[in-house]
Image (spheres, rainbow, N blue to C red):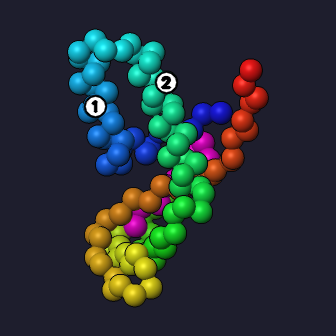
Amino acid sequence: MAHYQHYRASTAGIALGEALSELKEQNLFTEAEEDVIWRKFDRAMTEALASNVVDTHLTLKGSLHHYRFCDNVWQFFVKDAQVKFDKRSDFTPAGYLKVVACDYVKPTNPKSS
């Protein structure tokens, strides 16, 4: 099963990408090995965020400017957005915001030999 790659733009993904670039420049591994690392990162991020480990709630207010749905990925573009990360905090202005929401299907683990 393929996993979404948009977590590569997160802080952790950017740091991993920089480390992989440095190691590849030093010829410590091949592009095929780099691809394996990226696939494992994509899967780990998807599974971690789908589990109960993440317990943060986000409240979003604003005006929906437009939206897209393609390949089971929703993209919402919100103008004059305001976000609140838990029930105790106040809303923070975020300006123009893009929200990406993906369907999650729990991958099956093939039995390894």
SS category of the residue bearing label 2: helix
Q: Residue at x 29, y 40 (%)?
A: 15
Q: Residues within 10 Å of mark 2 (few under 14, many from 20)?
A: few
Q: In this rendering, is residue 105 above or below 37?
A: below
Q: Residue at x 44, y 85 (%)?
A: 87
- Whether residues under marks 2 and 1 lie with C-beta atoms below 8 angstroms apart, the answer is no
Question: Which label's residue is closer to the chain start, 2 or 1?
Answer: 1
Q: Which residues are magenta?
A: 68-78
Secondary structure that dominates the magenta span: strand
Q: Quadrant of the N terminus?
A: top right
Q: Which mark is residue 19?
A: 1
Horizontal relation, residue 84 to residue 74: left or right: left
Q: Is residue 4 visible?
A: no
Answer whether residue 75 is magenta in the image. Answer: yes
For disc 2, the marked residue is 36
Amino acid tagged 2? Val
Q: Nearer the viewer, residue 36 or 9?
A: 36
Q: Residue at x 47, y 37 (%)?
A: 41
Q: Residue at x 45, y 15 (%)?
A: 32
Displayed quadrant of residue 26: top left
Displayed quadrant of residue 53: bottom right
Q: Residues within 10 Å of mark 1 (few under 14, many from 20)?
A: few
